[in-house]
Amino acid sequence: MPATTVNIPKLEISPQERAEGKPTPESVDAGARLLRETGLVVIESVLPRDWIAEVNVAMQAVLDREEADVPNGEHPLLKMPFMDARIIDNPFSMQILKAAMGEKIFAYLPYGCNSTVPGSETQWIHRDSGQLFPELPFALPVSTIVVNIPLVDFTVENGATEVWPGSHLIVDDAAVRNTPYNVCDEARAAQLPSFQLVMPAGSVVVRDMRCWHRAMPNRSQTIRHMLALVYFRRIHHFPDAPTIFGTRVSEEIWANMSEATQEMYRFQAHD
Ligand SMILES: O=C(O)CCC(=O)C(=O)O
């Protein structure tokens, strides 16, 4: 029987796009299509290796200080090199994100980092986001996307993330739907194709957060870091709308509201 091969959905870009750090409209379309159809797209070696190696060292220093309980002062990930535009406004991921979720997407800082240490075990299979309307018998277009940037080469040995392509479109049974982290049944996932995200440091992965995935055991001698930036489709929150949503409520009125009322109007400006 022939071996089953599952290809990593890679967006092949030209040397010119890579040199200019800018995708063509055709590449953006192709990337958005791979994301829509498989749940993720990988653009290899977009960021300079030597600079990514510096970010990796800086990340390790932050985590070492955290572990030693040394006060980091202002949030260390809100400083350079972590706030570099190549990370927080990466032209490849940004254009695909906007093609998939519209121009008005938003995100929060600081972003996160997924690390596996030597000797770490297999993580449970999970989705980072469930379906938007989990009771519907079909999946809707994407509304949450994570952009991952590996800070070292991802290999089978150091536990490259395992992903199930197409799983973003799977609708869970009621029993699974309401569990924390949307943990996926191992036996069920074993029937479906998956691959490990083997890729060079400085690649960019754009992944629908509904995709089943897990960290794999790190059998190397070094820690494996990966940046994780989460982006949201804007659906109902319009703080920058010019009229009614900018209205400010006086502090006196605000202070007299119950906690429940303040919670209801939590995005309302007040002073
Ligand atoms: O570190 C990894 O490979 C994946 C971890 C992850 O995505 C998670 O914990 O949600």
Image: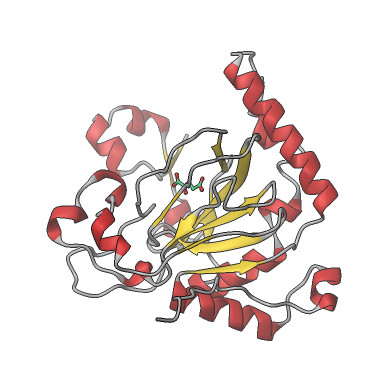
Residue name at image x 81 percent, y 52 percent = 49
> In the figure, is residue 220 to the left or right of 47?
left
As drawn, 83 above or below 233: above
For residue 169, which quarter of the picture? bottom left
Q: Position of residue 42 (x, y in %)?
A: 61, 67
For residue 11, which quarter of the picture? bottom right
For residue 220, which quarter of the picture? top right
Q: Position of residue 259 (x, y in %)?
A: 26, 30
Residue name at image x 70 percent, y 60 percent = 90
Q: Position of residue 61 (x, y in %)?
A: 71, 26
Q: Nearer the viewer, residue 23 or 188?
A: 188
Q: Is residue 81 visible?
A: no
Q: Among all residues in the image, which is located at the extreme bottom? A: 26
Q: Position of residue 210 (x, y in %)?
A: 38, 61
Image quarter (top left, top right, bottom left or bottom right) of the N terminus: bottom left
As drawn, 170 above or below 261: below
Residue name at image x 33 percent, y 33 percent = 253
How many numbered tags mark residues here? 0
> In the figure, is residue 252 to the left or right of 261?
right
Q: Is residue 220 visible?
A: yes
Q: Nearer the viewer, residue 32 or 234?
A: 32
Q: Nearer the viewer, residue 250 or 46?
A: 46
